[in-house]
Amino acid sequence: MQDSPSIAKQLMTTAEAVQRRAEMIAGSRVKTAAGLAAQAQRREAYRNVIALELQYRLERALAAADPFDEALLRFWSNHFAVSTDKALIGWLAGPYEREALRPHLAGRFESLAWAAVTHPAMLLYLDNAQSVGPRSKAAQAHPRSGLNENLARELLELHTLGVRSGYTQADVVELAKVLTGWRLFEREGRWYAGFDATAHEPGPKTILGKTYAESGAQELEAVLADLARHPAARRFICSKLARHFLADDPPQPAVDRLVAAWGDAGDLAAVNAVLRHLLEDPERIPVKLRTPEELVIAALRAVPQLRMDARAAYRAIRQMGQIVWKPPSPAGWPDTAAEWLGPDAMWKRVEWANQWSMRVHGEIDVRALAKTLFGARLSEHTEQQIHGAESQAQALALLFVSPEFQRR
Amino acid sequence: MDRRTFLRHGLALLAAGAVSGPRFALAAGMRTAPERRFVFVILRGALDGLAAVAPIGDPAYAALRGKHDEAELRPLDDFFALHPKLEFVHGVWQARELTIVHAVATGYRDRSHFDAQQVLESGGERAFELRTGWLNRALQLDGVRAMALSTAVPLTLRGDVPVDSWAPSTLTDPDPDLLERIGRMYQEDPQLGPALVRARALHNGAGMADRETVAPQQYFLELAKAAGAFLTAPAGPRIAVMELSGWDTHTQQVARLAKQLELLDRGLAGLRDALGEAWRQTVVLVATEFGRTVRFNGSHGTDHGTATVAFVLGGAVSGGRVLTDWPGLGDSQLWQGRDLRPTIDLRAVQKGILRDHLGLTNAALDREIFPGSSRIPAVTVLSRS
């Protein structure tokens, strides 16, 4: 994967972002006039960071020699979703994708899961940063603290095994204990994210019938390795991949092939290879409805004359109902057409196509573009309507809303 | 940095005056006064000239079109009558500030909107023969600036001379015609088809009020008012281009054209009001890419045709006539047995305006603005002689 967006040098690392976020929180307690002015500046900086990170996300998507890599990133970023619904996650959403997810897209699932779950964005979003082992040193210092099960539950339900796959409430509590200690902490004025042994619940933990000896930070690694090998996780995640890349109701043989590639080790490189093979099948008919973000990226790749900046792009995506890094729940954005095609959402897609088609700088042979983009799957209806359009703008609007363009 | 690099760097919004370039010699004694204004209104989609300016005196007219006529046509002379919705335009006619050009067409003879608009805007003989717009080439006049009233600059204003553009920041709703076309495109799509039907139903109901949009009925009028404001601003542009889509009336033509022509008429009225005194130095050309079939089709509409009508109006026009070499509507007189036969090349009209209003020389018009058009001399449209 190449990496050369224009703004890469302005971006923060996770460590910097953790520090800036902590400073913002500390600063919000200062109620003097100067303090209030500084708060306003920090809020501005916060908004700018989100905008910059979105620009980075878009530039990489547009520059990608292989769009499949960026599609994988979007899938896993949605699978291990974080949301700026929770205060100040915006500092970390970009570094999270860049540092936790991207390096592991073709590695082993347990490495990806470990990087995602232990990143401060996730620790904050699903409240693990506040979870303290009841018998830990930290709990003795702060008697009102205790376990928070949020991350543990979602880790089982959303990230690995899937709902109703056999785990119990006891498993959730035990996993929450394993997760204790993974949080944000301060040492001599600097903030860190990582494993804080003082908050970790001591003693062995039993999850899904297997007992893990006390081993501090290593416990989570051991648990994730087992979850990655669990048949329920394998099937759940492979089905989800197939649903995302192939069809809302994916064919069983395709899921089986992915499961086989996943193997015992959660081999994502092998899974990716199968996915790519399935996607490149010349017989395949694209049936997946594009999400708003996918639609906008596809439009910008297909029509460079649009010259939209990232702010305009994400505004359009938002208007069509998807706020990147702000999914409505930890389950991420929905992945079936029915959920993306409410009447208002459909209307917004038409409005978007209409608006953007009028913002093209230059001449486009829309008829030729349709042939290039859709090839043999250009339908008679679409071709007729594009040919009969009364203007370039109308033709382009029709191309953008065409069934062929709406799907991938 | 030379001029080419300058342009390549995308600084296309700077005033023309900031750039040096070739300038055409103006006709002797006809230096362009900076007060002269020119507005080009592009009607995209192909206006039916026979509906806008009906040749009621043609013996074949009643049989072809009579039953589709609006009740209250506005008579112009003993042969032509104006569509009833063109109320303001009729007033301009009565003030003798309007020349109607009928049976006019560009040099293009096929029936593709895209190609025809490319010709209309580029000023070429064939589609994609020229890559810049005739109006941009004409802009190489001393110190005259132009402005596009649209988010993107239309081809007719694209070229070496930088041009500004402006459009209301609020967004318009998709027009009904686009929605109809999408509906046809979705007719066999089990997912998108029903979703669109529901979306339209909800959108037309009360469910989606308080949207921040300019109503489609207001959009062209807003553009026109803005054009008037720009054209009267001190040191502002003196040439403006506006466009109005929605003329592709393959179905339900009578009702749709009534709405469209009303939009056009109100926009032109708004332009005149916004120009105020400057109306007296203004020429407006209203033109479309081609006409429509003389006969109605099976869905109460008309299909793509050839010749149509163009309007030249403004305080700088001494008009009150229909300029035409009327070809007739009899079967044997029609172009390819179906369309109004073109008898005037639109370039002759465009040249006449550029020569008589903006002071371009015939040589520049024949060679640079409309290359290879010396066989099509300018016609006088701004005065009655």
Image (cartoon, coloured by chain):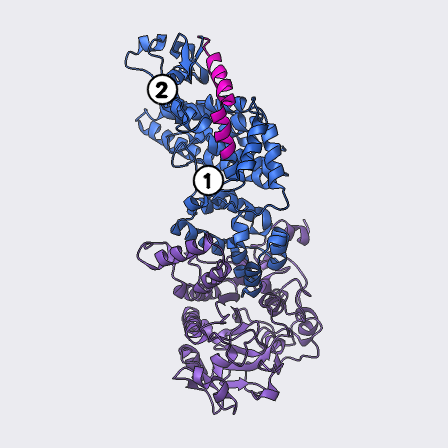
Chain colours: A blue, B purple
For marks 2 and 1 on the same chain, the one whose residue lies earlier in the sequence: 2
Q: Position of residue A305 (x, y in %)?
A: 59, 52
Q: Do badges 2 and 1 share one subunit?
A: yes
> Which of B345 and B321 lies nearest the eye of the viewer?
B345
Q: Secondary structure at mark 1?
A: loop
Q: Residues within 10 Å of mark 1 (few under 14, many from 20)?
A: many
- Is residue A225 shown in magenta? yes
Image: A200 above or below B12: above
> Which of A37 and A90 lies nearest the eye of the viewer?
A90
Q: Secondary structure at mark 2?
A: helix
The span shown in magenta is A214-239
Subunit under mark 1 = A
Q: Quadrant of residue A89?
A: top left
Q: Position of residue A142 (x, y in %)?
A: 30, 12
The residue under label 1 is A335
Compared across the picture, whether A285 is left or right of A137 comes to right
> Which of B351 and A157 lies nearest the eye of the viewer?
A157
Position of the N terminus of chain A, as image quadrant, is top right
* Numbered disc in front, either 2 or 1: 1
The residue under label 2 is A130
Res. B96 mark: none
